[in-house]
Amino acid sequence: MKSGIIFDIKQFAVFDGPGMRETIFLKGCPLHCPWCHNPEGQIADPMLMVSYAACIHCERCSAVCPSPDDCILCGRCIPECPLGLRRIAGEVITAQELEKRIRKDIDIYKENGGGITLSGGEPLMQHDFIIEFLDRIPDIHKAIETSGYASPEVYDAVYSRLDLIIQDIKIFDTHEHERIIGADNTMILRNAEKLKHGDKPFIIRIPLIPGITDTEKNYSQISSFLQGSRNLMRVELLPYVKAAGAKYQMVGRKYEPVFFNPEQDPVINTEIFEKRNMRCIVL
Ligand code: SF4
Ligand code: SF4
């Protein structure tokens, strides 16, 4: 039986696919997007998170800590905090246990035309685990939110088990993708080709980062690539969230966005898709 590591389960989600859904967030991501607002999803292993901004420095946590210089995730400090500021992000769970958890509310989701959505981090990084989990729930609508960064073998195996794929295309130019995000996009575009020619409904998401993904060139390349896709439901534009750095301090990191000005508003261009007969919305 395979185990995975998740860092959250969001109930009654309404933006992660049709109807009302349970969204499962899996840890670990191979990309390094400088605008990422979920730093706890980037690292594959469990980690301590502390809301330092609200700390009253009572030192109750330090008093019980057996390893102050190098956290061993023993969890002793968590119940000691009077304000509940400490938690461990990352839970090891089997596919069987995850199925048991989501089945508690599944009838409500089904009645609302919903189901479950795998998100992250990058869920395809834990492909063995998610394949086992997806095979346990044939009766439930299954979606994924993915960067598309996975080998064709992994991607195709997961794709065949899904009902809806929500995939990012962030930067179309391969060299720019590698320069900004730290990995080239050959596999992402190969997998997007599969979506274009496949028989499953899909949604493409573009995070709008000022000066990076909202350029005329990027809009033009993505819209031209997607033109004629049979099962494209829509393109979703996600403007940069100015509070993206809020959680970095909680995981002991500094948010230092590079390559773009976080104060600048992104250019929103839905028309370029509409002119090519694609539906495009701003989230
Ligand atoms: S979980 Fe808390 S008590 Fe345990 S080692 Fe880490 S900081 Fe110390
Ligand atoms: S127990 Fe909570 S409030 Fe007290 S010092 Fe630790 S984190 Fe801060």
Image (tube, rainbow, N blue to C red):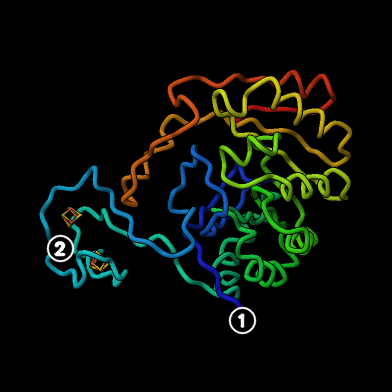
Amino acid under disc 1: Met
Amino acid type at circle 2 is Ser
Q: Residues within 10 Å of mark 1 (few under 14, many from 20)?
A: few
| Residue annotated with mark 1 | 1
How many marks the image carries: the answer is 2
Q: Is residue 18 visible?
A: no
- In the image, 266 versus 281, the foreground residue is 266
Task: Please report the residue visible at 66 percent of the width from the left and 55 percent of the height from the top.
Answer: 115
Q: Which mark is residue 73?
A: none
Q: Residue at x 43, y 22 (%)?
A: 263
- Quadrant holding the N terminus: bottom right
In the rendering, which numbered label is found on residue 62?
Answer: 2
What kind of element bears circle 1?
Answer: loop
Q: Is mark 2 within 8 Å of ligand 2?
A: yes
User: Residue 149: where, in percent of width, then height?
Assistant: 67, 52
Question: Element under label 2?
Answer: helix
Q: What residue do we see at 15% from left, 69% from top?
A: 64
Q: Classify mark 2: residues with Cα within 10 Å, few (<14), some (14-19) or many (20+).
A: some
- Along the horizontal axis of the image, is 90 left or right of 214? left
